[in-house]
Amino acid sequence: MSRLHIADTGLFVAMGQPSNSRYQAVRRFARRNDVTFVLPERVYEELTVDDPDVEEVPIDTVIDEDWATVAASLEFSEPVVSRVMDGIQRYIANADDRPADEVERADTALAALAAQHLSAGTTTDVYIYTTDIAAGEGAETVLASEGYGDSVTFVNGFRFIEDLVAGDS
């Protein structure tokens, strides 16, 4: 059984710096469970903002420590990828009561990456870690409509980190 762990910007922002107990708890989880978090390119771009006023999230440290990696580009020519991105965009727009063109592309890329791997048969189970409830619930809903309902799990990033830190206490 092949598992894919897809992570959103919010998970890494919530973890904080390497000296933070939240960061250390997630790192221990990844190492103990042989988990490598996969980031869509758009998520990586969000985490590497080139702005001197923004504190950098240490994503490159996480990648250097081998418990996260950046995914290859999404295959937009694959119909399921485009359908899922459009579906997530509509779902989030409806859930947040905002125009669809204001939905962040990184949020839609989470489910699109899952769809790409599930449809190609390179994975059988996907865990999507995000702090954005609408993005997580939308991913489960839209991917279920594509026939992958039993293969996708939304993991609330805040709760995930809280549970790990509480377990270490």
Image: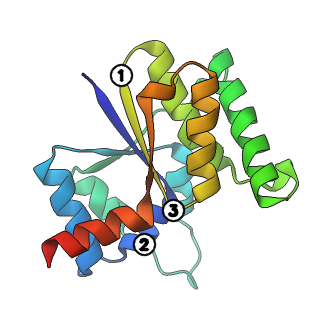
Amino acid type, label 3: Thr
Residue 33 located left or right of residue 77? left
Q: Which residue is mark 1?
A: 124
Q: Residues within 10 Å of mark 1 (few under 14, many from 20)?
A: some
Quadrant of the image for the C terminus? Answer: bottom left
Amino acid type, label 1: Thr
Amino acid type, label 2: Ala
Q: Which mark is residue 14?
A: 2
Q: Which mark is residue 131?
A: 3
Judging from the image, what secondary structure is the residue with disc 1 in? loop
148 relative to 109, above or below: above
Q: Residue at x 53, y 52 (%)?
A: 43
Q: Residue at x 81, y 56 (%)?
A: 102
Residue 105 or residue 45, whichever sits in front: 105
Judging from the image, what secondary structure is the residue with disc 2 in? helix
Gap in angstroms between the C-alphas marked 1 and 2: 28 Å
Corner quadrant of residue 95:
bottom right
